Amino acid sequence: MKRNVSSDISRSGFLHRMDWLLLILVTICAGASVVMLRALWTQNITAEVDSNDWIVQLISMALGIAGCITVAAIDYHKLAKFWFLYVPPALALCALTFTSLGYGREGADDRAWIDFGFVQVQPSEILKLVFLLTYAFHISKVRDKLNQPAHLFLLLLHAAVPAGIVALQGDYGTAIIFASMTVFMLFTAGLSFWYLLGGAALMPLAFWALWTYVFGDVHRNRIRVLLNPGGDPLGLEYQQNLGLKAVHAGKLFGKGLSSSDYVTVPEMHNDFIFSFIGQAFGFVGMVTVIVILACICLRIFRDSRAAKDQMGKVLCMGVFAIMFTHDVMNLGMVMKVMPVIGIPLPFFSAGGTAMLSMYLCIGLVISAYTHNQKKYRVFYDAENMN
């Protein structure tokens, strides 16, 4: 039986070219998440965590690694070209959040989950992936016409659809993520500095409109307490104050994973996982986590520079926007320099859909990095070979 030598070389080249360091870094974070969730359950630190949480996280990590490598092996041009196969299901899932299947987590302001009985899904995480591919594809189609008002308007309208959907769900944190992705991707594609300057000038007006017509009283008060610390210590400040107390309790090296006197923080397994990192591993542990997250962001940026074309670069920078914005907002929220807005820490916070979604995002980055030369492609798009 004759071997396909060129195919073997291509696959060997693909595995050699893969950004294994990026995959290893995110898997270190995911593995740490599984260990911490299990500790939160076994130590009975908070009633919010049960045995299923760390098991779901472990399964999601395993599926995520497999999904990441699979996506990385496929030419991103081909993935984007078949947008009509995955856009309708993603929108349908988002629509289900407005039906009886949709629900909001206890203590959350949004209604962004679907309960199918045997599994719970957060469609907005899937929508991020869909937006990454469709927006990069859209930008690649207009290219040099990007700064023409008509084309830019359509691009902004494209971005407004997913952002509007999650905003209607009450998930303003994810809406901010979509806005960040839009800015980073357009800037990478060559958006005129004048448009950026004009957008910056309109920010105060946009904030006034959001404050007046969109935000509810609870959202306004979360911002007010940052400007007036101590104004509501038993109300909206309570969670953040406990988070800071937990961080301080860890001191330099932390209490480890088997202490008997942890400070319990609401959502400590999810949005406030960094507060548990602080008290379990101390200042050293927090700095280590921040360094790893920074290295992941820098690695994504580095891969964007190595991408073959504009579409690959834009795709990578969209993922960079997700990671960077999540990191900054989550850490700022825990450290009480930003309002509580329900933003998880990527690869650390509990959530199977979010874990799997982030792994697939990393797969897209590695695809853009790996498929920048014809000889390293595994499942390539013949129309984009040159």
Image (cartoon, helix red, strand yellow):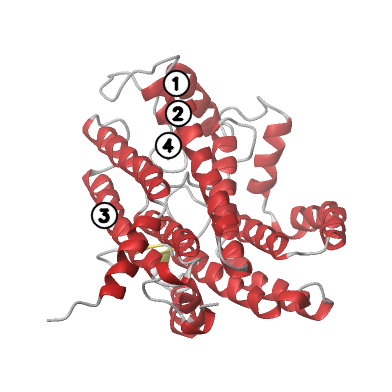
Q: CA distance from mark 2 to mark 3?
A: 24 Å
Query: Between residues 349 and 75, which one lies in front from this camera angle?
Result: 75
**Which numbered dot is residue 369?**
none
Say which residue label 3 marks.
62
Give the farthest residue toward the top.
252
Q: Tell me: residue 63, above or below residue 219.
A: below
Can residue 174 be seen at all in this image of the molecule? Answer: no
Instruction: Say few, some or many: other residues with alpha carbon within 10 Å of mark 1 (under 14 / 14 to 19 / 20 or more).
Output: some
Say which residue label 2 marks.
288
The reply, left or right, for residue 374 in relation to residue 155 is: left
Say which residue label 4 marks.
273
For marks 3 and 4, give the one nearer the viewer: 3
Q: Could you tell me residue 224's position as x and y percent?
A: 71, 37
The reply, left or right, for residue 313 in relation to residue 31 is: right
Q: Residue at x 68, y 26 (%)?
A: 229
**Which numbered dot is residue 284?**
1
Q: Residue at x 55, y 44 (%)?
A: 298
Can residue 199 be seen at all in this image of the molecule? Answer: yes
For marks 4 and 1, give the one nearer the viewer: 1
Q: Residue at x 57, y 30 (%)?
A: 335
* Type of amino acid under label 1: Val
Query: Between residues 203 and 226, which one lies in front from this camera angle?
Result: 203
Query: Between residues 346 and 293, which one lies in front from this camera angle?
Result: 293
Q: Considering only order in the chain, which callout, 2 or 4, is on the residue closer to the N terminus? A: 4
